[in-house]
Image: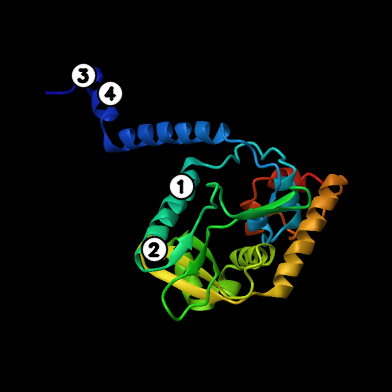
Amino acid sequence: MGRTEGEEAMMDFNSTSSISGQITALVDAGMQRARAQQSARQYLGASRLGAACERALQFEYAKAPVDHGRDTPGRMLRIFERGHVMEDCMVAWLRDAGFDLRTRRADGEQFGFSVSDGRLQGHIDGVIVDGPEGFAYPALWENKCLGMKSWRELEKNRLAVAKPVYAAQVAIYQAYLELHEHPAIFTALNADTMEIYTEAVPFDAALAQRMSDRAVKVITATEAGELLPRAFHDSTHFECRMCAWQDRCWRKKA
């Protein structure tokens, strides 16, 4: 017996793909609403200073509206949230392993720094003040949760080569929080296999200085209304294609 039109519609509504699409759309919308209610960052984040393009940092610092259709998709918001959740897991695991890891100040706020009248700020994952033998304390602790490809690249080439943005973040955090005497402890969790990569990262004073100088350059130029040069000469470069301000940037001649 053939199905009626209404039965066909019901079958389609209850199909796996339809339900997945509906739930995903609802979750995405909810996450976007929650994100929209968060206070906008009023400073240049130190964690971003190692990014390839100084002009993109300007757009970020100036809170320039992103291009139409370039809002952060729900899938990426879930990846960000996964990073926060896995960071909490790493905190618990390291403490269970005997590390005295502090992630909050006595007043409950994150450890961090604010310079240039609050224009440049950074918030660290934590400080390890004591623990098992074989490590030097106190040490800056930074953690990331990475997909398989990124994690394997990190394991093969180490932080400075595989993830220069993270290396810059570690260096400037060590400098401004005066945690440069001992190597930072950088951990990365493989989101697919749950393997843990760990690297002791000595303080790179030259890198920290370059990033500090870069922050001054980006802030000064932005507040003066000057656009810094693009990092790339072709709008089809993959970094440009991934940039939320690609159209805005390339509408300008320089």
Residue indicated by mark 2? 95
Q: Which amino acid does label 4 sit on?
A: Ala
Disc 1 vs disc 4: which is toward the camera? 1
Asked if residue 194 is positioned above or below residue 23 in the image, the reply reads below
Horizontal side of residue 220 vs 31, given as left or right: right
The residues tagged by marks 2 and 4 sit, at their Cα atoms, a distance apart of 54 Å
Asked if the residues shown at circle 4 and circle 3 are in contact, with their CB atoms under 8 angstroms apart, the answer is no
Residue indicated by mark 3? 4
The residues tagged by marks 1 and 2 sit, at their Cα atoms, a distance apart of 22 Å
What is the secondary structure assignment of the residue under circle 1? helix
> What numbered label is drawn on residue 9?
4
In the rendered image, the residue lying farthest to the bottom is: 134
**Which of the two labelled residues, at mark 1 and mark 4, occupies the earlier sequence position?**
4
> What numbered label is drawn on residue 52?
none
The image shows residue 192 at horizontal and vertical percentages of 36, 61
What is the secondary structure assignment of the residue under circle 3? loop
**Which of the two labelled residues, at mark 1 and mark 2, occupies the earlier sequence position?**
1
What is the secondary structure assignment of the residue under circle 2? helix
In the rendered image, the residue lying farthest to the left is: 1
Q: Which amino acid does label 3 sit on?
A: Thr
Q: Which amino acid does label 1 sit on?
A: Glu
The answer to whether residue 227 is visible is no
The residues tagged by marks 1 and 3 sit, at their Cα atoms, a distance apart of 44 Å
Quadrant of the rendered image containing residue 223: top right
